[in-house]
């Protein structure tokens, strides 16, 4: 079986992840890699409906409901998109994955990491990204960058202390998985961040040959 690689992008809201996702996609395509680009929550028709429920600011919910919906969407995503692509030798780039659940539901909402670990084991059954790029910015920078959004979603409406806990949880998760999660200083200019993404991807490609 020709197995593709699974790359995920993470960061607090406003870290500039989407810009870099476009760049990374173009870079890998240029190198001849067949790719599926997807996102979480979402990535499947049902997952996108769950995303709409999760982001709708009128849907207040228990933090465990929030986590369970994230993982429900993820189960579909793995089954319908991620696993079939990887088995086919296609690479998958996902805009967020489980590290976001540890950061947002764990750090942000204060949900116990042990519960998230159980869900992770249940839903992923050993599947982990091969490489994760965590675009790290101080919370004030992220908040500044999202301050122009006209209708912020349920997460973007959160306050500074929420995003501080999210960022701290991402950093803690990166310390737990130092070989998989690469921290990129996303305070730098777009071109400087790009240069770091490029060199990380070159190293990853060399190592995975
Ligand atoms: P985001 O990538 O920020 O979408 P957009 O750039 O279109 O606004 O993702 C949506 C939100 O979902 C984001 O605020 C983080 C949140 N999220 C979680 O809370 N837990 C998760 O497991 C995932 C995947 C996302």
Image (tube, rainbow, N blue to C red):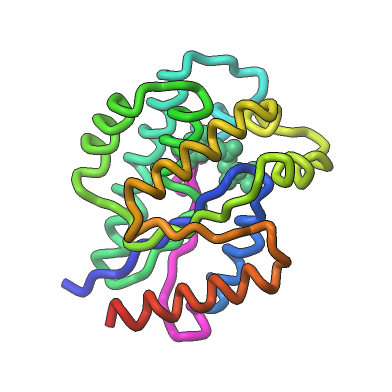
In the foreground, 114 or 30: 114
Q: Quadrant of ligand 1?
A: top right
For the question of whether residue 45 can be seen, the reply is no
For the question of whether residue 188 can be seen, the reply is yes
Residue 99 percent across, percent down from the top left: 42, 43
Query: What residue appears at the point 19 percent right and 44 percent down from the top-left corner?
Result: 125
Screen quadrant of the C terminus: bottom left
Query: What residue appears at the point 73 percent right and 66 percent down from the top-left corner?
Result: 189
Total numbered labels: 0
Screen quadrant of the N terminus: bottom left
User: In the rendered view, would you say 160 is above or below 18?
Assistant: above
Query: What residue appears at the point 50 percent right and 22 percent down from the top-left corner?
Result: 109
Residue 13 percent across, percent down from the top left: 64, 43
- Specify whether residue 35 is painted magenta: yes
Over which residues does the magenta segment extend?
28-49
Q: Quadrant of residue 12?
A: top right
Residue extending farthest to the left is 1
Residue 178 percent across, percent down from the top left: 35, 56
In the foreground, 81 or 138: 138
User: In the rendered view, would you say 137 is above or below 70?
Assistant: below
Classify residue 23 as left or right of residue 114: right
- Specify whether residue 15 is painted magenta: no
Q: Quadrant of residue 19?
A: bottom right
Query: What residue appears at the point 34 percent right and 28 percent down from the top-left corner?
Result: 113
């Amino acid at each position: 079986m020709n197995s593709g690689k699974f790359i995920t992008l993470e960061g607090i809201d406003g870290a500039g992840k989407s810009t870099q996702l476009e760049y990374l996609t173009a870079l890998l395509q240029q190198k001849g890699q067949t790719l599926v680009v997807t996102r979480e929550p979402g990535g499947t028709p049902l997952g996108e409906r769950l995303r709409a429920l999760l982001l709708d600011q009128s849907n207040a919910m228990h933090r465990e409901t929030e986590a369970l919906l994230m993982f429900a969407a993820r189960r579909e995503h793995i089954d319908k998109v991620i696993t079939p692509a990887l088995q086919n030798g296609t690479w998958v780039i996902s805009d967020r994955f489980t590290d976001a659940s540890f950061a947002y539901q764990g750090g942000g909402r204060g949900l116990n990491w042990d519960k998230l670990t159980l869900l992770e084991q249940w839903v992923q059954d050993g599947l982990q990204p091969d490489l994760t790029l965590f675009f790290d910015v101080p919370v004030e920078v992220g908040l500044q960058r999202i301050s122009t959004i006209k209708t912020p979603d349920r997460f973007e409406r959160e306050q500074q202390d929420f995003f501080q806990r999210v960022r701290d949880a991402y950093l803690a998760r990166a310390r737990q998985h130092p070989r998989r999660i690469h921290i990129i200083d996303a305070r730098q200019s777009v071109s400087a961040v790009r240069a770091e993404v490029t060199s990380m991807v070159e190293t990853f490609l060399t190592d995975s040959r």
